[in-house]
Amino acid sequence: MSRDMDSKNTFTYEDVEMIANHILEKVKCRPKLGIICGSGLGKLVDLVEDKEVLPYQEIPGFPVSTVPGHEGKLVFGQLRGKSVVLMQGRAHCYEGYTPQKITLPVRTMKMMGITTLFVTNAAGGVNKKYNIGDIMIIKDHVNLAGFAGVNPLVGVNDEKFGPRFPAMSNAYDLGLRQLALAKAKEIGFSDFVREGVYSMMVGPNFETVTECKILSLLLVDATGMSTIPEVLVAKHCGMRVFGMSLITNVVISEYDSPAHANHQEVLETGERRSKDLQQLVAAIVADLDL
Ligand SMILES: O=P(O)(O)O[C@@H]1C[C@H](O)[C@@H](CO)O1
Ligand SMILES: Nc1nc2[nH]cnc2c(=O)[nH]1
């Protein structure tokens, strides 16, 4: 397929179909479950057996992540007896990509037959009860980037993807949230697994103190720089969505505090919690009906 796809910022239905077919020609696996791994969470691929790996550079049009903690590989294989594809790393708008480009992999997964999407991310804890290392099951989001016009669904709408005005009141599937909470209890994780609201600003800077105070007033529990564009596109094309944030740091909400957020802490918390995240994801996937 032509590499012209790489310079595109928006993709037609036919473009996405071509990219999906290109991938399916290269791998044997035919998954129904897709998992996007957030910053420092790429070790989730350790759960996968019979791996088939495609670097994003080899997939026409796919944005390549430039951020440490995002490998940039599509990993197919078996996870607890289920066929799965993991995105080991994602691209973000703050890297200079359009919202349509960072969500191309989601539409491509849909076209490859994925019906359920798990999205994960590293996030800063806004809720004062949250601790570093907590896992938050996402029950809803506040699309702050969307308030500023950053939304992958802006533009011409092709009904073959989904409706012009998609509902988002049920973005994070209730059944999957209940399954995740039940599994967390079963494996003894209830003390650090919570349910809450995620928000996204484009980044790449972390929040100011006043921004953190505003997030708290907006009922946000954890904040990051990703996930929401992917969820909007996944819901638009009819996928079932489940989301999880690892609380890698707590946001700074006191003026004149000497503490500050940094990406190293984000990666270190991801590393420290990677086994727990693997255990929880494996337990959920084992009982998932696809
Ligand atoms: O890809 P995610 O949302 O997990 O990454 C978060 C947001 C930034 O990319 C990075 C900041 O440390 O972590
Ligand atoms: N915006 C934002 N993104 C994050 N990703 C990980 N931690 C944070 C944070 O504190 N703020």
Image (cartoon, rainbow, N blue to C red):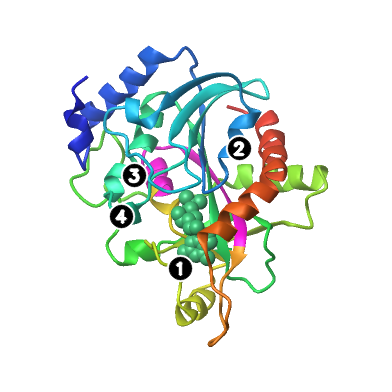
Q: Which residue is mark 1?
A: 206
The amino acid sitting under disc 3 is Ile
Is the CB of mark 1 within 8 Å of ligand 2? Answer: yes
Residue 182 x/y as whole percent: 75, 45
The residue lying at 33 percent from left, 61 percent from top is 146
In three-dimensional space, the C-alpha distance between marks 2 and 4, rounded to whole angstroms, equals: 29 Å
Q: Residues within 10 Å of mark 1 (few under 14, many from 20)?
A: many
Q: Which residue is mark 2?
A: 43
Is residue 269 shown above or below 117?
Answer: below
Residue 84 x/y as whole percent: 54, 26
Query: Which of pointers 1 and 3 indicates the residue nearer the eye?
Result: 1
Q: Which residue is mark 3?
A: 102
The amino acid sitting under disc 1 is Phe
Direction from residue 16 to residue 206 in the image, left or right:
right
Q: Residues within 10 Å of mark 3 (few under 14, many from 20)?
A: many
Q: Is tag 1's residue or tag 3's residue first in the polypeptide sequence?
A: 3
Query: Which of pointers 2 and 4 indicates the residue nearer the eye?
Result: 2
**Marks 4 and 1: CB-CB under 8 Å?**
no
Q: Secondary structure at mark 3?
A: helix
Q: Which residue is mark 4?
A: 151
Q: Is tag 3's residue or tag 4's residue first in the polypeptide sequence?
A: 3
Q: Is tag 2's residue or tag 1's residue first in the polypeptide sequence?
A: 2
Q: Which residues are magenta?
A: 230-248
Residue 231 x/y as whole percent: 43, 47
